[in-house]
Amino acid sequence: MAYEATLRSTEGVLIALWQGRGRAGPGDDLSGYKEVVLMDIFGLEARYLGAVTSLAMRKAAADFIINYDKNLGIRAWLGR
């Protein structure tokens, strides 16, 4: 899963592009996701896929938040 963000000035000038990425799979603890993502009528496989997608999205968002300030354009814009 990947998120991409674009930061522009109020004049529309591109300041930076950056991405957050996340992966999830069989090795991850999905116990908190399987029960709430999809109802039982969709079956085990659908619940598993929903849980993996949800966890991957969460990891991508976390990566995005943690690493955005490593982008040189953002650092310059923030004056770092």
Image: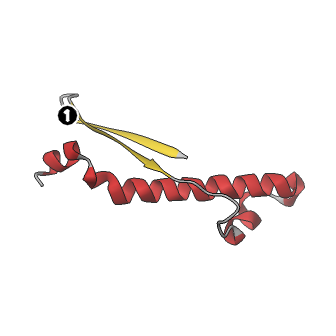
Quadrant position of residue 11: top left
**Residue most toward the top?**
12
Quadrant position of residue 37: bottom right
Residue 27 in the image, given as x and y percentages of width and height:
67, 65
- The color scheme shown is secondary structure
> Badge 1, how many Cα within 10 Å: few under 14, some, many 20+?
few
Residue 19 in the image, given as x and y percentages of width and height:
40, 44
Residue 21 in the image, given as x and y percentages of width and height:
48, 50
Q: Is residue 8 placed above or below 28 in the rendered structure?
A: above
Q: Is residue 31 placed above or below 50 in the rendered structure?
A: below
Write the residue at 76% across / 57% down: 48
Residue 29 visible? The answer is: yes
Residue 38 visible? The answer is: no
Write the residue at 36% across / 60% down: 66
Q: Amino acid under label 1?
A: Thr
The residue singled out by tag 1 in the image is 10
Q: Is label 1 in a helix, a strand or a loop?
A: loop
**Residue most toward the front?**
27
Left or right side of 48 for 8: left
Q: In the picture, which quadrant includes the C terminus? A: bottom left
**Residue most toward the left?**
79
Write the residue at 52% across / 53% down: 22
Write the residue at 71% across / 61% down: 26
Residue 40 in the image, given as x and y percentages of width and height:
86, 60
The number of callouts visible is 1
> 70 or 78, which lies in front?
70
